[in-house]
Amino acid sequence: AQTVTQSQPEMSVQEAETVTLSCTYDTSESDYYLFWYKQPPSRQMILVIRQEAYKQQNATENRFSVNFQKAALSFSLKISDSQLGDAAMYFCAYRPATGANSKLTFGKGITLSVRP
Amino acid sequence: DTAVSQTPKYLVTQMGNDKSIKCEQNLGHDTMYWYKQDSKKFLKIMFSYNNKELIINETVPNRFSPKSPDKAHLNLHINSLELGDSAVYFCASGLFSGNTIYFGEGSWLTVV
């Protein structure tokens, strides 16, 4: 079974600084997708960034980028120039590319606080 | 205009009652999901439907009964509510052979 591990329950970053959130996963699949979702206090699930496993290039979305290490089964999120609005819970998630079991499996999440 | 919409957003009810949460998506997706987020904020899948057919059922108590009248709708009915059912329930949708899954805003269920 696929598992997603976020070992850090909480992190804090100074406004305008850079922070990296860690995630590892376990899979025997060769083709899959990885995601980071942001959940603010409103509990809305907001897609931050997506990575296709077949792509070697790391995904980037404005201030958000990932470090995808397929061999190491690692998928970290880097937030540059942190803003107060980045404070939220962040979930790493995995989805196999094919098959009837093509569901999203989430890590336990990490709470990010941003210090002004 | 909302992509995945679920109602109601808030629901407070007594133990033993029966309640339903409705979900609709206008994204043209063929697969829909129900996820439960517990008090520790852990997100776990409950059910998935593809083109109205159940494809995932993650050992959820049979008090929970999903119904998909068409591929744009997936409703969740809960019988004999228990205190432990208190959670945020998320509806989501995506393409079976696609990548991203999109979430509704969540339905906050409190059982008292």
Image (tube, coloured by chain):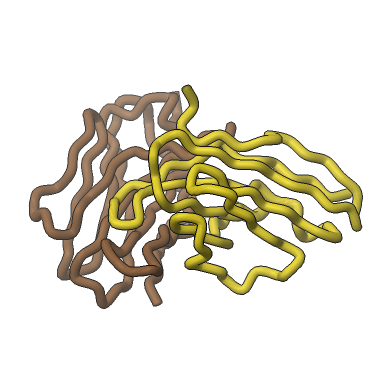
Chain colours: A brown, B yellow
Q: Residue B75 vs residue A4: left or right?
A: right
Q: Residue B8 vs residue A94: left or right?
A: right
Q: For the N terminus of chain A, give its image quadrant.
A: bottom left
Q: Position of residue B81 (x, y in %)?
A: 83, 57
Q: Residue furthest left?
A: A56
- Rendered position, A23 above or below B94: below
Q: Residue B35 vs residue B65: left or right?
A: left
Q: Residue furthest front?
A: B70
Q: Position of residue B51 (x, y in %)?
A: 45, 55
Q: Which residue is at 33% across, 47% downward? A: B100
Q: Position of residue B53 (x, y in %)?
A: 50, 62
Q: Which residue is at 18% across, 43% downward? A: A59
Quadrant of res A27: bottom left
Q: Which residue is at 74% across, 47% downward? A: B20
Q: For the C terminus of chain A, give its image quadrant.
A: top left
Query: Which of B60 and A53 lies nearest the eye of the viewer?
Result: B60
Quadrant of res B47: bottom right
- Rendered position, A2 above or below A111: below
- Rendered position, A44 above or below B96: above
